[in-house]
Amino acid sequence: MKKTIFLVQAAMIAAIYVVLTFIANAFGLANYAVQIRFSEALTILPYFTPAAIPGLFAGCIISNILTGCIIQDIIFGSLATLIGAVGTYFLKKWKWCAPIPPIIANTVIVPAVLIYGYGLLPEGASVLYYYGYYALTVGIGEIISCGVLGMILLFSLDKYAGKIFSA
């Protein structure tokens, strides 16, 4: 029974991640230099259940494929979400730290994808300068998505966590 609940929770989280990414994508917010993926707010869910780890990873892979991302983004963007989810799970003793791992993982990994995968580097421009620029823009988007929206979600779910995430 516990394996079934784990699988269902992971699948539901993946599905919700995909839907939220499509909503952000409809507004042009899901990809490239400025990313405010509403779905990234879900990266706080490993605070409540380990099922969120594979759910977020699968949801990100599916979202990246369906929104037309390149292979580097599908792989490394999804790995950033996976790393963030695992980090959140391990920091679950400290509620206010829940959004920090996904913010850091995406801020470090996604700028390299933008530069080397999408080629968002003007000819002759400094890689270090643009890496810093994209780290800033992605980081701001992650702070909004994970830090602000994620913490609103965490505090909203906290009261009902025993009912929603019980195994």
Image (cartoon, rainbow, N blue to C red):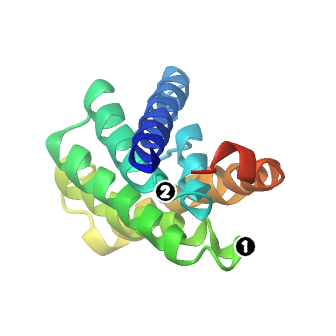
Look at mark 1 in the image and give the residue it sits on: 96
Above or below residue 23? Residue 77 is: below
Give the left or right position of residue 124, taking residue 34 as reference.
Answer: left
Work out which quarter of the rendered image holds the N terminus and state it.
top left
Residue 144, percent from left and from top = 66, 53
Mark 2: amino acid: Val
Above or below residue 45? Residue 95 is: below
Q: Residue at x 42, y 56 (%)?
A: 53
Mark 1: amino acid: Trp
Residue 30 visible at all? no
| Residue 18 picture quarter | top left
Give the left or right position of residue 162, taking residue 92 as reference.
Answer: right
Give the left or right position of residue 145, taking residue 6 as reference.
Answer: right
Q: Assess disc 1: are there few (<14), some (14-19) or many (≥20) residues with their C-alpha within 10 Å of its C-alpha.
A: few
Look at mark 2 in the image and give the residue it sits on: 138
Instruction: For mark 2, give the secondary structure.
Output: helix
